[in-house]
Amino acid sequence: MKRIPAARRTALLALLALGAAGAQSSTQSAYTGPRVQLTFLHGFTGADRPVMERLIQQFNAAHPNIQVRGQAQPWGTTWQQLPSLVASGRAPDVVVINEDQITNFIARGAVSPLTDAELRTAGIDKARYYGPLFQTANYEGKSYGVPISSVAYVMFYNKDLMQKSGVTKVPTTRAELLRAAQQCTTDTSGKKAGQAGFNKANLSTWGMSLYNNWVGSRLAYAAILQNGGSLVDRNLNANFNSPQAVEAVQFLVDLVQKHGVARPNSTEEAELAAFSQGKVCFFPSGQWYTDRFEQQKLNFGVAFVPRIGNQKDAAWGGSSHLTLPRQRAGYDANKRRASLEFMDWMTAPAQNLAWTEAGSLPVSPVVARDKKFEGRPIAGVFSKLGSIYATSGFPWGGQVLGPFDNAWANAYSGKQSVKAALDAGVSEANKQITQARKSFQ
Amino acid sequence: MSLSLPRENVPPRRRRSFENSGLTPYLYLLPFMLLFLVFVVYPVGYGFWVSLHRWDLLAETRPFVGLEYYRNLFDFSTPQAQFFWNSMRNTGFFTILSVPLLVAVSLGLALLLYRPIFGRSFFRAVFFLPGILTVSVMGILWRWMFDNQIGLVNAVRTDLLGLQPLPFLSSEGLAWIPVVVGTLWWTIGFNMTLYLAALGNISQSLYEAAEIDGATAWPKFRFITWPLLGPVTLFVFVTTVLASFQLFGQTLVITNGGPNRTTQSAIQYITEEAFTNNQFSSAAAMSFMFGLAMLIFTVLQFRIMARDAREGT
């Protein structure tokens, strides 16, 4: 065991001596055991797949004693197959699990914890990654995964419409957001939001996009976190109807119902089209639309979600984590060590930088500082990537998020008051959690 | 000679005894039987076993809970009962709404396109073609058509008719319109083709005789076409009802079961319970309840079909 850190130290010294520190990733392996073959199951299909396959090839070329065989399949298939693969002792060596599934798999015992000693031996330094991102795969004080990919909720803004409306600063606070949105909102007769005679039923341009699906509800999630609220309490019961949550969501709903700066009853597609056509100043959504707006040659920027709450910066994020599933008794310890080496290499800065080509955000600050991002719109959110929080940490994600999304849709559409919608959502979620808890006994 | 006799007689006797044993039909059935046992009987039995346990492949224990998950479906303080029966109601509502339309409109189209009108083949193809699309393509198309803001339907309402736009996708009740209209557009061609084939089998001499007796269009339809289309109407009706009960993709893509689960179908809810909530036993129990409802309906249909067949002979 002592030989491995020594070998790693030697490798690093050799790299430094060659002046290759800038290469960012060691081609020397911390794993020096016999040749092993690893199976790597992941859901990076479509455009992500060639990037991942290229990285796997590079890993194999640099590690003669570890051969990784990547297997791409749709995420949903993996969620359905993983329990039976683990139960039958045929689990792949490394599996990628997303933030919305990971706590459930951990709580059900499908994933094995990564000890501090193992992480240290493999050279995986938790501090290398954004804190909340690494913690997404934590449960009951233990780490279960290493982040490889990350997406986040951001606020896109249309520079042309902002300029035309006289908005000179991208809003970062609640008051600034409301003021800017009012300036951007004009009815068909030319009156601005807040002016006498303004008709919010007939908008020509408007300040902000809100909409009724799960992507829309992630802004409410951010606002709740920013206000010091949360989706679940310490006992992991739903509590997104706390006073902080009601206050935060009320502000968003007021943007539609009271101030008239967002359209009621809108859909994500409609808001996306409106933003592309320059009819709305601020479009909060997933960062994955950046490429699309760049291709459209839109004059736009990307900002972190403004501070709607009064406690901290926060936005929703999604992520994918490299995990080691539970294996049958007598599993080859060399394979586990080799898998950890693979996890370290794949999430090292050089590889993570290459992985951002697939549309992911950097998983560590050192990657975010790379020159590649200079002048790119997405770089606008990099200073706050450490304030991105996944909806994770409780094993009953579906039971909480479904009712939460529904509560948002009901509050936003005005079908129910914010308090009534959130109360109903929490009541439903907690009934579902009571049922789900029995499965974990 | 004496030696050759038995030799000649033995093989035919053997053959006869094998044929008479009655095994032959079972041997023909054997391959299907094996597949049926492996892919139908075993999974159904396993599913029932799952529904009686608190089941998770990863759990160390899978305690027997008896009918707990079935009881949940009749205890209205549980979300399972509330949402399952809501989804069953939605599925029934969709069936009642869509089946008469799918039968009547396809019959109407078939009657129109059976006549030697100009561009008949073109129109037949036009009505049949949507059926080759996958449900996701069809769903996205109709979601766009009925979008609250940018949909074509609302564009016509506001720009041409001067009306207010309607929030089809987020209003309870209205959300059924894109689902039903989309399903109609998507599946009508198949039923229409069945009717066209059946119309081709009706002898023209019957119409000629009726014309000699002075019958106009309506009596000809009422007393010749409609009765002779009876068997195919029954077939179209039964298959359309079964297909409507299996509503899943359309509501998943167009409305995602919303708003407020008002368009969530039974299969969609069962899928949610199994793969979003990871409550496999609960979902299995729901599947059996859903299967039972389908079974009752199918038995009724078979009775009607049997009666129809008896009357036909």
Image (cartoon, helix red, strand yellow):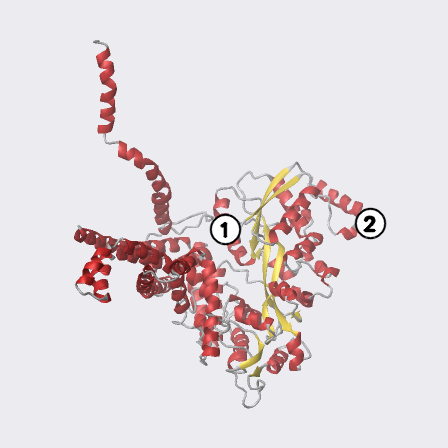
**The residue marked by circle 1 belongs to what chain?**
A
Which residue is pictured at 50% across the width and 74% down the height?
Answer: B149
Residue B78: x percent and y percent? 37, 63
- Say left or right for A357 vs A409: right
In the rendered image, the vertical position of residue B141 relative to residue A6, given as above or below: below
Q: Which class describes the residues within 10 Å of circle 2: few (<14), some (14-19), or many (20+)?
A: few
Return the residue at label 2. A19
Q: Are marks 1 and 2 on the same chain?
A: yes
Residue B56: x percent and y percent? 44, 50
Which residue is pictured at 29% across the width and 58% down the height?
Answer: B237
In the rendered image, the vertical position of residue A190 relative to residue A312, given as above or below: below
Q: Secondary structure at mark 1?
A: helix
User: Is residue A72 at all visible to an observer of this figure?
Assistant: yes
Q: The N terminus of chain B lies in which quarter of the figure?
A: top left
- Say left or right for B226 vs A74: left
Residue A271: x percent and y percent? 55, 72
Label 1 and label 2: CA atoms lie apart by: 45 Å
- Say left or right for A235 vs B308: right
Which mark lies nearer to you, 1 or 2? 1
Q: In which quarter of the view is residue A304 placed? A: bottom right
User: Is residue B297 at all visible to an observer of this figure?
Assistant: no
Residue A340: x percent and y percent? 64, 46
Q: Residue furthest front?
A: B212
Residue type at numbered disc 1: Thr
Return the residue at label 1. A77
Residue type at numbered disc 2: Gly
Query: Of residues B139 and B101, which is closer to you in this image?
Result: B101
Query: Of residues A274 and A372, which is closer to you in this image?
Result: A274
